[in-house]
Structure formats: C-alpha cells, structure tokens
C-alpha cells in the first residue's frame, strides 16, 4: 500500500509498530528457547505489512461494517482494520486477553485518529465471543493457535452472508502447523464455507461464508 493512500497519522503509527517489530526481530536472535518462551507475551508478533494491507483491502472492498478481531495483541492489525472500518462507516470489535496490550493499542489508535472505530473486549476470547451477537461481515483470527478451532465453532453461526474469515499463521511458524491444519480441516469440512490458503505473510486461510 502506498503511504499516499492512507493519511499521515495512520501511516506514522503503522511505521512505529514496524520499527518496534524490527527491533524485536533482532532481539529474537539473541534469546534462547527458554527465554523466548518466557518473554513471548512481551513481543509484538504482528501480521506484517502484506497481511495488514490485504486485511484493509478486503474489508473495504467487502464494505464490512461489522468487523471482529479475535486476538488484538498490541494492536498492529487493529489499526489496519480500523482504518478500513472508518472508510466504510463500520466498527471493529477486538478481543484480547491482556488489558495492558489493549491500553497500548488504544493509545496508538488515538494518535492515528481511529479510536472511535474500535471497541475492545478484555478477557477470555471464547467467553467474549460466546456473548457477542452476530452477524459479522469480516473476522480475523490471530491468537493462540490451539484456540483457532474453538473460535471458528463459535464464530461460524454468527457470520453474515458472504462474510470473510481470515486466519493468520497457517504456514509459519512451523510449530503452529498442527493447529493450523486442524483449523483448515474444520473450515474445509463446513459445507457452507469456501476456503483457500494464501502464501501472504505467515500464510493466511481466507474463507467465505456462503
């Protein structure tokens, strides 16, 4: 995406996130496996610009006004989705376990001029999702990989006709592949879903509800 197609305040926040991600990537190389596991919740772990750009484009082209994000983390993908929501007159509901992460995301969304287009729900994602009414027109699933299938099972009956569901980390990291395969199987056996694996970013499964 060309910076000219997005306003300067949004682009500045995206670049700040990406600078942080680059610093953390350098740090990864210095950490042992045990230290990495201990500190993983401190890391940004963003979907990356390619996936963020695609999310933004899909939401705009679909005119998705009710957008669900399952797993905000520190809010990188939230910014891409919120910018699209603003463009189409919609809103993002974003689910995140840790309040400190949503506080970080909220501050950056405010600087990007997008805070009014996101509603965070802090707590267990499955509990939050169970309480949310549908329908949703676009959903991003990007949390702990063992939760992908339970999330899909709760989300499936809350999808609007033609809704898009995007699941991240379908190819990388390798450690997530068993859960990614289980998720892809769940989507492919659902008769009212059509789905394709795209080699974008860390690999996404793009699914459409019929």
Image (spheres, rainbow, N blue to C red):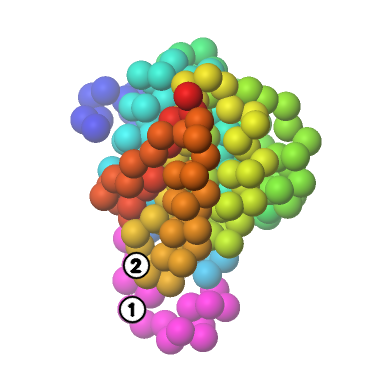
Determine the image quadrant of residue 19: bottom left
| Residue at screen point 38% across, 66% down | 173
Q: Residue at x 61, y 56 (%)?
A: 147
Instruction: Work out whether residue 83 can be spotted.
Output: no
Q: Are marks 2 and 1 in contact (CB under 8 Å)?
A: yes
Q: Secondary structure at mark 2?
A: helix
Residue 82 drawn at (x, y percent): 49, 29
Asked whether, in this view, residue 82 is left or right of residue 169, the answer is right
* Quadrant in which residue 70 is drawn: top right
Relative to 185, is 154 above or below?
A: above
Residue range corresponding to the magenta coloring = 22-39
Which residue occupies 76% across, 46% down?
A: 127
Residue located farthest toward the top when viewing the structure as drawn: 89
Residue 177 forms part of the magenta stretch: no
The answer to whether 42 appears left or right of 133 in the picture is: left
Q: Tell me: residue 69, above or below residue 71.
A: above
Residue topped by disc 1: 29
Predominant secondary structure, magenta span: helix
103 vs 31, left or right, is right
Quadrant of the image occupied by residue 154: top right
* Position of the N terminus by quadrant: top left
Question: In the rendered structure, does residue 37 fall within the stretch colored magenta?
Answer: yes
Q: CA distance from mark 2 to mark 1?
A: 7 Å
Task: Classify 10 Å Cα crowding around label 2: few (below 14), some (14-19), many (20 and above).
Answer: some
Q: Is residue 81 above or below residue 198?
A: above
The tally of labels here is 2
Residue 60 x %, y % = 39, 20
**Disc 2 target residue:** 25
* Local SS, label 1: loop
């Amino acid at each position: 995406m060309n910076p000219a197609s997005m306003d300067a305040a949004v682009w500045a926040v995206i670049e700040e996130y990406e600078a942080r991600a680059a610093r953390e990537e350098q740090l990864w190389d210095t950490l042992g496996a045990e230290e990495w596991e201990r500190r993983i919740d401190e890391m940004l772990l963003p979907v990356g610009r390619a996936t963020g750009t695609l999310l933004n484009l899909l939401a705009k082209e679909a005119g998705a006004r009710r957008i669900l994000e399952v797993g905000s983390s520190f809010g990188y993908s939230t910014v891409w989705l919120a910018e699209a929501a603003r463009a189409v007159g919609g809103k993002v509901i974003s689910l995140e376990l840790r309040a400190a992460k949503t506080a970080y995301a909220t501050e950056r969304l405010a600087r990007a001029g997008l805070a009014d287009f996101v509603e965070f729900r802090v707590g267990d994602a499955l509990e939050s999702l169970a309480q949310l009414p549908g329908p949703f027109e676009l959903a991003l699933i990007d949390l702990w990989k063992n939760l992908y299938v339970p999330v899909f099972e709760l989300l499936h009956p809350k999808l609007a006709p033609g809704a898009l569901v995007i699941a991240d980390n379908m190819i990388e990291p390798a450690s997530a592949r068993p859960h990614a395969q289980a998720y892809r199987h769940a989507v492919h056996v659902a008769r009212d879903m059509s789905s394709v694996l795209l080699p974008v970013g860390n690999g996404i499964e793009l699914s459409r509800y019929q």
